[in-house]
Amino acid sequence: MATDELVKTTTGIAHHGAERLPSVEIDSFNIEMKDEDGFLGDRASKGAFREILERWRKPLRKTGEDPFGKEPSENISKKTLDAMLIGDDTEASAVVHSAIEEFAQELAYVTRRFLKTKAWAKTERIVVGGGFRDSRLGELAIARTDMILKAEEFKIDLQPIRHHPDEAGLIGALHLAPSWIFEAHDSILAVDIGGTNIRCGLVETNWKKAKDLSKAGVVKSELWRHADDEPTREGAVKRLTKMLKGLITEAESEGFKLAPFIGIACPGVINADGSIEKGAQNLPGNWESSKFNLPASLIEGIPQIGEHDTAILMHNDGVVQGLSEVPFMQDVDRWGVLTIGTGLGNARFTNRRKESNGKDRDSAEGAGKKKSKGDKSDKE
């Protein structure tokens, strides 16, 4: 099947990994910058925080006074660390606070480097998502980073992503859909694929209450920890198809007007035909193979939703998580997202303004100049 034919078959709308979406231009995503120590993102990842915590525990361990005992730093839950922050053990609290401060300095350094790239110039606000954000210690680290940057006179606001990180990647998929979806339907299917989990959700638009999708929410979701099962690539697609079919059945039985549209958030650089160029190394099997196409595979398993042909649009997971913030970013022009997880996801957006006659200021969807997609051009 020719590329153009495949794009049409699997989307019927914009292309996968599109630089222009209905609400925003995507100026860059998945940029991998390096310094003398390696990839910058590794300095502000979930693992980086655990390494910092471990360094602060070492001096106490030598004197036998480590408040965390023998528990490895990577195994201590965020819930436990949050409790330590406000607990009676001042030494434990001090260790966590110290780790937060050092991590904030690293996050500020990485953010500074992003802001100095051409793609991130004139950024006014950054939202921080990913699993790390879902904790008190994560919120404190983000707030402290914001203070550090403001003290250095960066005119930037850094804030936690509004929705729970587990739901942001599903809600953001609404902003991949064309506007006609919302006029006749009240919900879509969304998929958020990660290195550990695959999450599927039924997302209600609540478009009649708020046409900017600010009232959208996840009605039902299903989680599969594929990392525990270690499936083959084909086994993962089969399980994902089954999960989506289950949600379709539930949506129909509960009276939802489900759109014939599936939005997918997936790690890596997504090509226009739905193949993955790079960045999918943590997924089960080889997802970067030229012979594999997730949207096309799902179309085979779910050719129709209701009485209509299924349309699928896939984009980078950091981009989609960031898109959940579109309704709340209308007071700025340029904004970005950083997602703190196994690595550091990143994307920068420019809002597309509507003219008074309701038409976009720019030309039709899908046009536009080439953007920075995970290239190495911003390495310094």
Image (tube, rainbow, N blue to C red):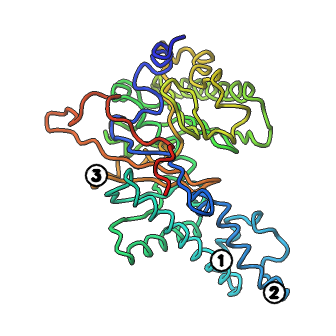
Judge the density around disc 1: few (<14), some (14-19), many (≥20) Cα neighbours within 10 Å. many
Question: What is the three-letter code of the residue carrying label 2?
Answer: Glu
Q: Is residue 80 left or right of residue 229?
A: left
Q: Residue at x 43, y 42 (%)?
A: 372
Q: Quadrant of the N terminus?
A: top right
Residue 378 image position (x, y, % from top left): 46, 51
* N-term-proximal mark, 2 vs 3: 2
Residue 208: where, in percent of width, then height?
33, 36
Q: In the rendered image of this protein, does residue 159 appear above or below residue 57? A: above
Of helix, strand and loop, which one carries label 3? Answer: loop
Q: Nearer the viewer, residue 250 or 313?
A: 313
* Residue that label 1 marks: 96
Q: Residues within 10 Å of mark 3 (few under 14, many from 20)?
A: some
- Amino acid type at circle 1 is Val
Which residue has dot 3 on it? 333
Q: CA distance from mark 2 to mark 3?
A: 51 Å
Occupied quadrant, residue 175: top left
- Where in the figure is residue 89, as x and y percent of width and height? 71, 85
Q: Position of residue 110 (x, y in %)?
A: 51, 63
* Amino acid carrying mark 3 in the image: Asp
Label 2 residue SS: loop
Residue at 37% x, 47% y: name it.
349
Secondary structure found at label 1: helix
- Decide: is 185 above or below 37: above
- For label 2, the residue is 65
- Numbered-mark total: 3
Q: Is residue 72 left or right of residue 256?
A: right
Q: Are marks 2 and 1 in contact (CB under 8 Å)?
A: no
Q: Earlier in the sequence, mark 2 or mark 1?
A: 2
